């Protein structure tokens, strides 16, 4: 197929496809699915070999959010019967993190619900990071606290954070239909603040909220231009008690096509299968590993994933290997960009990169080096937790699955915030 040959050749060079080519990936048929996976797999192996990075979520503060993100089980007015608790103490969070690291995770993602942190919250997270790094100085830490104010990213960086997660979630043109309490521009601003402070930028999307193919392609190109080092791809988990509890717009095949499109547009970027992996990919999860190079281990923020051991078994059975703490995630040329950002060169320039300005190497379009490894810098994941989103007015889902599988959605009842052991 000409399309896949073209996309493979571009991906192997680190070049980005055209928008039309990205749309064409989403329009491929089920008969072409394994060819699509194979093509994306070549690109994935070129830049990331057979390594799978494991990330572990610790929900520091759950529920009770004043924001109205309609996909989220923690939103204002959510009736989802999730765990609700305020800030974990540093030692509680460190205990949860330790379980994930013992299970094979090289990155811990510290997440708290809310519009954004207060300065006191930054202090809390600073203490938490210190407790985690005291137990394991090598662990990477990504922080996800919502919208950042001036100087907060710098404080997190100085306190030892490696990355900051803030997802764009969907296209700029449809953002207002899923959230009213903040804007797409607010989210872009926070990603830029994090990047500008020298934190690795982790920013991704949620699929299955009723968006069109064009919306998906728009947000994925926006993430590329923003210089995201890691792109978590969430598949909407339609929680009961949230606006889209009945929205099931994804099939396993559709999820694989979306992952492949994200990979082709971000050939040398960490692509992570995030929330909804078990719910929507189901028995096709191993095929996702041929496209993405990163997953979450165990449970998500407010829902339960499959057993951590099942994740490890799946990786091994599919012929992949868990990325070790001493191995770099990103290809070397991407790590060099990150290092330059940390040195203050390009780092303030997520916006410059996004505008296509003179900051060429910054995330945008890399042509680079062979499939070698990178430096120990890169990005992490966020709300691997989509709940439910309102349908996007005027945009019918490109592909539907009428089957409601609410039986697959399991609210998290163990790990952080409970007396029960975490799943890792
Ligand atoms: S995504 Fe974050 S900001 Fe939005 S409702 Fe959920 S916890 Fe609040």
Image: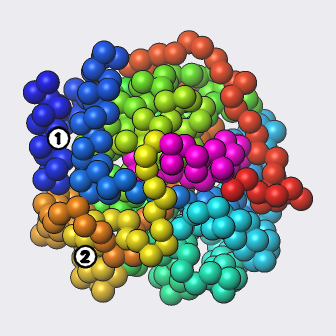
Specify the quadrant of the image occupied by residue 337: bottom left
Whether 339 is drawn above or below 164: the answer is: below
Is there CB contact under 8 Å for labels 2 and 1? no
- C-alpha separation, residue under disc 2 versus residue under disc 1: 24 Å
Q: Position of residue 288 (x, y in %)?
A: 43, 38
32 or 399: nearer the eye? 32
- Taking the image as shown, residue 213 lies to the left or right of residue 251, namely left
Left or right, residue 250 beside residue 219: right
Structural crowding at the residue carrying mark 1, measured as other residues with C-alpha within 10 Å and reported as few (<14), some (14–19) or many (≥20): many
Magenta run includes residue 86: no
- Residue located 33% across and 65% down the image: 330
Query: Can residue 179 be seen in the rendering of this structure?
Result: no
Disc number for residue 214: none
Which residue is found at the position 46% from the left and 55% from the top? 321
Q: Earlier in the sequence, mark 2 or mark 1?
A: 1
Q: Answer with left or right where residue 126 lies relative to residue 229.
A: right
SS class, disc 2: helix
* Residue found farthest to the top: 402
Q: Which residue is mark 2?
A: 336
Assign a secondary structure to mark 1.
Answer: helix
Ligand 1 within 8 A of label 1's CB? no
The residue lying at 62 percent from left, 27 percent from top is 244
Residue placed under numbered mark 1 in the picture: 8
Q: Residues within 10 Å of mark 2 (few under 14, many from 20)?
A: some
Q: Which residues are magenta?
A: 292-317
Q: Is residue 81 left or right of residue 230?
A: right
Where in the figure is residue 204, as x and y percent of width and height? 43, 50
What residue appears at the point 55 percent right and 38 percent down from the top-left corner? Answer: 277
In the image, residue 295 lies in the stretch drawn in magenta:
yes
Q: Give the mark toward the camera: 2 or 1.
A: 1
Q: Position of residue 327 (x, y in %)?
A: 40, 71
Q: Nearer the viewer, residue 240 or 367?
A: 367
């Amino acid at each position: 197929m000409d399309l896949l040959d073209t996309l493979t050749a571009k991906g192997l060079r680190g070049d980005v496809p055209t928008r039309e080519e990205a749309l064409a990936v989403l329009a491929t048929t089920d008969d072409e699915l394994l060819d699509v996976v194979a093509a994306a797999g070549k690109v994935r192996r070129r830049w990331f070999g057979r390594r799978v990075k494991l990330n572990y979520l610790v929900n520091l503060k759950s529920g009770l959010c004043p924001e109205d993100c309609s996909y989220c089980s923690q939103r204002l007015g959510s009736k989802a019967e999730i765990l609700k608790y305020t800030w974990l103490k540093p030692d509680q969070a460190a205990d949860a993190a330790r379980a994930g690291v013992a299970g094979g995770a090289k990155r811990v993602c510290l997440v708290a619900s809310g519009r954004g942190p207060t300065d006191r919250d930054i202090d809390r997270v600073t203490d938490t990071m210190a407790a985690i790094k005291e137990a394991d100085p090598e662990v990477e830490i990504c922080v996800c606290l919502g919208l950042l104010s001036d100087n907060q990213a710098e404080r997190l960086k100085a306190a030892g954070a490696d990355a900051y997660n803030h997802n764009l979630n969907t296209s700029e043109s449809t953002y207002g239909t899923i959230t009213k309490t903040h804007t797409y521009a607010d989210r872009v601003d926070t990603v830029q603040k994090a990047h500008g402070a020298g934190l690795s930028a982790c920013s991704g999307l949620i699929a299955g909220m009723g968006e069109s193919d064009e919306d998906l392609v728009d947000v994925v190109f926006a993430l590329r231009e923003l210089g995201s080092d890691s792109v978590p791809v969430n598949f909407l988990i339609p929680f009961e008690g949230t606006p889209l509890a009945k929205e099931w717009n994804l099939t396993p095949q559709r999820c694989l096509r979306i992952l492949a499109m994200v990979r082709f547009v971000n050939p040398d970027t960490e692509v992570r299968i995030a929330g909804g992996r078990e719910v929507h990919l189901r028995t096709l999860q191993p095929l996702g590993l041929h496209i993405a190079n990163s997953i979450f281990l165990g449970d998500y923020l407010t829902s339960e994933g499959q057993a951590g051991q099942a994740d490890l078994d799946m990786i091994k059975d599919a012929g992949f290997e868990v990325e070790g703490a001493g191995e770099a995630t990103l290809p070397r040329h991407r790590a060099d960009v990150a290092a330059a950002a940390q040195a203050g060169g390009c780092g303030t320039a997520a916006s410059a990169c996004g505008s296509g300005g003179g900051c060429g190497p910054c995330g945008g379009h890399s042509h680079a080096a062979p499939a070698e490894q990178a430096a120990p810098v890169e990005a992490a994941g966020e709300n691997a937790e989509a709940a439910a989103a309102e349908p996007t007015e005027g945009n019918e889902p490109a592909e539907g699955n009428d089957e409601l599988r609410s039986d697959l959605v399991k609210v998290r009842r163990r790990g952080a915030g409970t007396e029960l052991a975490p799943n890792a």
